[in-house]
Amino acid sequence: MNNEFDWIENCYQCYNEDNWISKRDYRKTVVVQGDHNHCLIDAKRLSRHDYDDSEKQGYCSTDGRIWFCKDCFEKIQKRHKLSEIKNTIGTIENALRNNSNVIISLNNNQYFLKNENDKIVVKHNESVKIYDDILSMEREQQFYGKSLREIIDDIFIGVV
């Protein structure tokens, strides 16, 4: 093998028979269902639990069948331009309006959002903040030191 990317490329080519990987769309996602998933390429554990040597976020195909860790997806994405659907603030707003819980993650550091009695509750570490509505949360809440609009392209989003 010529470089460290060769084994990832070889694995990708093996699994992509009949465009099994490339015909799907992918999204930055937090693991919210089941115990864990594994990256298709390097088998890294992606889990909602705090297991040693696992991550809470990765890229998942929109049909839920394929998971990649962040590193493998970024390497494959550079070469094969897999289709990535961007997360939007609308995704978060719709989930909260439908009383779903939302997890926002960056570098496995998570915020938990939920609609509780028509108030938006944001939990992060030991901090809890309550907002009257989505607009006030978006205006006042800082995620990773930035507004939601500034950080939306970087974060991983899970809806439960």
Image: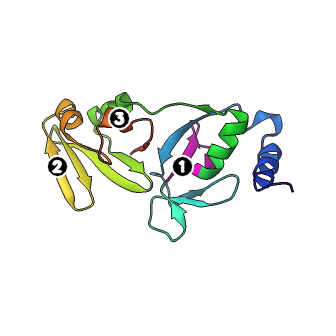
Q: Which residue is mark 1?
A: 58
Residue at x 37%, y 46% (from the top left corner): 104
Q: Position of residue 33 (x, y in %)?
A: 47, 52
Q: For marks 3 and 2, give the CA distance.
A: 20 Å
Three-letter residue code for mark 2: Lys
Q: Which residue is mark 3?
A: 150
Mark nearer the N terminus (1 vs 3): 1
Q: Which mark is residue 31?
A: none
Residue 61, located in which quarter of the rendered image?
top right
Q: Which mark is residue 129?
A: 2
Q: Position of residue 139 (x, y in %)?
A: 20, 33
Magenta extent: 57-70
Instruction: Count neighbours of disc 3 (C-alpha within 10 A) and say few if under 14, some if 14 to 19, many if 20 or more.
Output: few
Residue at x 77%, y 46% (from the top left corner): 12
Magenta includes 38?
A: no
Mark nearer the N terminus (3 vs 2): 2
Three-letter residue code for mark 1: Gly
Q: Secondary structure at mark 3?
A: helix
Q: Position of residue 7 (x, y in %)?
A: 79, 54
Mark nearer the N terminus (1 vs 2): 1
Name the side, left or right, on which 32 lies relative to 125: right
Camera-side residue: 31 or 142? 142
